[in-house]
Structure formats: C-alpha cells, structure tokens
Amino acid sequence: MTRLNLFLLALLLGSSLVLVRTAYESRRVFTALDQARLEQKQLDAEYRRLDAEAKAQGTHLLIERTARERLKMRTATAAVTHYTQDRPASEARP
C-alpha cells in the first residue's frame, strides 16, 4: 500500500507541475495576444491617418498651388505661348 501511495503522490505532483506550467504558458500567450491586438489598433489608426493625409494631398487645388509655388508654373496664355512651324522635309538643311 505504501508503494501505491508514493506512486499516486508522485503522479499528483507531476500533474500539478504540468498544470502550473500550462497555466503560466496560457497567461504568457494571452499577454502576447493582447499586445498584438493593441499594436493592430495603433497600426489601423496610423493607416487611416496616412490614408486621409494622402487623399488630402491629392486634391486638385493642392496640386495647382504646389505647381505655382514650388515649380513656378503658370497657366498657358497667348502672351506666353510660342508657336513653331514645322518645315517640310524638302526644305530641311542637310
């Protein structure tokens, strides 16, 4: 009977250790999942912000303002337009 009791005690201790390890592992995995969800929320918010910013930068007025200010472009009018005429191939110089 003593051998059976010792065997059952060892089995009980072993199963207790497995239970403790499993509980620890599940807490660790749950914490990692919670951190991943938090990071996902942050990345989603940043994506929405960047998407809205990209849409705002793509508007016609912003493009026109950038062309005028940074690139010093202006609208084409008859006063600033230069017309050229193509010479026929027979008149071209060799």
Image (cartoon, rainbow, N blue to C red):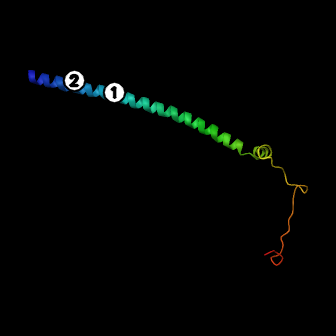
Q: Which residue lies at the image location 36% right of the left edge and 30% below the top edge?
A: 26
Judged left or right of residue 10, residue 21 is right
Residue 61, image x and y in percent?
78, 45
Q: Which mark is residue 13?
A: 2
x%, y% of residue 77? 88, 55
The CA span between labels 1 and 2 is 15 Å
The answer to which quarter of the image holds residue 30 is: top left
Dot 1 or dot 2, earlier in sequence: 2
Q: Quadrant of the C terminus?
A: bottom right
Mark 1: amino acid:
Ala
Which quadrant would the N terminus be assigned to in this image?
Answer: top left
Instruction: Indicate whether 84 appears above or below 74.
Output: below
Q: Residue at x 55, y 36 (%)?
A: 43
The residue nearer to you, when weighing 94 against 61, is 94
Which of the two residues, 42 or 1, is positioned nearer the viewer here?
A: 42
Q: Judge left or right: residue 43 versus residue 83.
A: left
Q: Which residue is pictured at 51% across the width and 31% down the height?
A: 38
| Kind of residue at badge 2 | Leu
Contact? badges 1 and 2 (CB < 8 Å): no
- The local crowd at label 2, few if under 14, some if 14 to 19, many if 20 or more residues have their Cα within 10 Å, is few
Q: Give the left or right position of residue 23, taking residue 58 as reference.
A: left
Q: Residue at x 87, y 63 (%)?
A: 83
Q: Secondary structure at mark 1?
A: helix
Residue 5: x and y in percent read: 13, 22
Q: Give coordinates of residue 28: x percent, y percent.
A: 39, 29
Disc 2, SS: helix
Residue at the limit of the structure toward the top, as seen here = 2
Residue at image mark 1: 23
